[in-house]
Image (cartoon, rainbow, N blue to C red):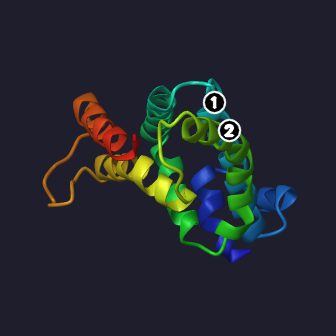
Amino acid sequence: MALNVPPAKACGISVATLYIYYKDKDDLIIQIGIEEAERLTAEILKDFNPELSFAEGLKQQWKVRAAQMLNNPHSAKFFDQLRTSTYKEKIHPYIVGQFKEAMGKFMMKAINNGEITAMPVDIFWSVAYGPLYNLIRFHHEGKGLTGQPFVLTDEILWQTYDMVIKALKK
């Protein structure tokens, strides 16, 4: 129970309130992680059309993902922490499941149309989204790779996107 005192205090609620809704600290973290994963996934996929061209679909994903992460910095940090925690295995399926269908259809169409080369999903994600998430991380930290002040601007965002498209398109 003592582990839940700081979160309860920070939320301005009684520690007992946590136990009404959650079995323990782990259940609290997992349930919040699942809830946030579902919210984020719904937002990112809300207006996504897998029939868009590869460049337009990826651009839409960059817009929505950047907006979500920039407007919800605590969520971005929370997912970074979950990614390297023991909770990842419990929460990850809630993220992957919904994305797999929509993005799978989008990717197959792009491959079949000759817009991109088929590649393992980890390689695709690293090239397509890795740069975006690094820029957002630099923005949240207020410093770039060299330690200099960094603010993510539209110019930087879309310059990077253009480079990603060049790297991925056939």
x and y percentages locating residue 51 in the rendered image: 62, 25
Residue 4: quadrant of the picture: bottom right
Left or right relative to 58: residue 107: right
Q: Which residue is mark 2?
A: 105
How crowded pointer 1 is (Cα within 10 Å; few <14, some 14-19, many 20+) is rated as many
The kind of residue on which mark 1 rests is Pro
* Side of 15 relative to 138 (left or right): right
| 107 on left or right of 141 | right
Please say if the residues under marks 2 and 1 sit with CB atoms less than 8 Å apart. yes
Check the picture and name the quadrant holding the C terminus. top left
Residue 97 percent across, percent down from the top left: 74, 50
| Of the pair 6 and 55, the residue shown nearer to us | 55
Residue where numbered disc 1 is placed: 50
State the quadrant of the N terminus: bottom right
The amino acid beneath tag 2 is Lys
Determine the CA span between mark 2 and mark 1: 6 Å
On the image, which quarter does residue 24 sit in? bottom right
Q: Secondary structure at mark 1?
A: loop
Q: Position of residue 143 (x, y in %)?
A: 22, 54
Q: How many other residues sit within 10 Å of disc 2, few (<14), some (14-19) or many (≥20)?
A: some
**On screen, 140 above or below 82?**
above
Q: Give the residue drawn at x 52%, y 30%.
A: 57
Quadrant of the rendered image containing residue 17: bottom right
Q: Earlier in the sequence, mark 2 or mark 1?
A: 1
Please, is residue 3 above or below residue 56 in the view?
A: below
